[in-house]
Image: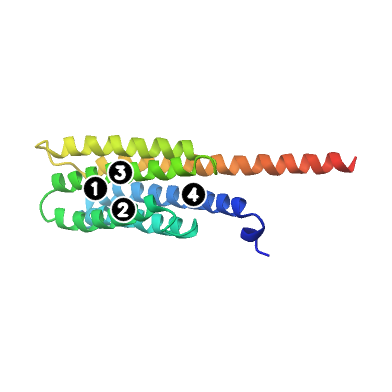
Amino acid sequence: MTDQLMDPAGAQERWLRFYYFARAAFSALWVAAAFTLGQQISSVAAVLLVVYPAWDALANYADGSRSGGLGRNRTQAINVIVSLAAAVTVVLALQTSMNAVLGVFGVWAILSGLLQLGTAVRRWTGYGAQWAMTLSGGQSALAGAFFIVQARMPPPPSITAIAGYAAVGALYFLASAIWLSVGEWRRRAGGTSRSAAGRL
């Protein structure tokens, strides 16, 4: 039997740990690229701005599929659609101005943040680290509102405004991954201690 059949909850938590580490790593790389090449080469900045919501769609699709299917994970299924729509809209907004792009990111950050919060609340009783995902979703919605306000101001924003938002998101995903790792380590340590005591 596979680990997933023998311990479905444990297998799912291991997946979530991997998923959170992967999202943290991607966001960190994206932020590094945005603060370096993204500030110097406009075409690179454009690609990065489209890739970010597209990656979010892919990540939500992978997690929803791995966690029982998108039919059972409606918040993530909706998030896939919202993020894909955001990626397409960013392509169109890039033809207008960075203010328009930031406005699109604002709407997307609000919607995807609320959907992420909904996913975290749904998982709260079953898996650890959801407090970080709840905070991340709430922070995303607040950041989105700020983006919309900032997009209406005359000075054109740069990709660094979004990079700061992505950096905070990376920290939340990293915190979730570490929290799950520590929880698993404690369970293993506790199991080892009980096994040792049973042999005495």
Q: Earlier in the sequence, mark 2 or mark 3?
A: 2
Whether label 1 touches label 4, CB < 8 Å:
no
Image height of 190 relative to 7, above or below: above
Dot 1 amino acid type: Gln
Q: Earlier in the sequence, mark 4 or mark 3?
A: 4
Dot 3 amino acid type: Ala
Q: Position of residue 72 (x, y in %)?
A: 44, 55
Task: Tell me the number on the disc at residue 52.
Answer: 2
Dot 2 amino acid type: Tyr
Q: How many neighbours does mark 3 have within 10 angstroms: few (below 14), some (14-19), or many (20 or more)?
A: many
User: How far is the residue under mark 1 from the one under mark 3?
Assistant: 11 Å
Q: Which residue is mark 3?
A: 163
Q: Quadrant of residue 117?
A: top left
Q: Which residue is mark 1?
A: 39
Assign a secondary structure to mark 1: helix
Q: Earlier in the sequence, mark 2 or mark 1?
A: 1
Q: Position of residue 52 (x, y in %)?
A: 31, 53
User: How far is the residue under mark 2 from the one under mark 3?
Assistant: 10 Å
User: How far is the residue under mark 2 from the one under mark 1?
Assistant: 16 Å
Q: Position of residue 143 (x, y in %)?
A: 28, 36
Residue 45 visible? The answer is yes
The reply, left or right, for residue 54 in relation to residue 192 is left
Dot 4 amino acid type: Phe
For the N terminus, the image quarter is bottom right
Assign a secondary structure to mark 4: helix
**Mark nearer the viewer, 1 or 3:** 3
Task: Tell me the number on the disc at residue 21.
Answer: 4
For the C terminus, the image quarter is top right
Q: In front: 33, or 190?
A: 190
Q: Quadrant of residue 126?
A: top right
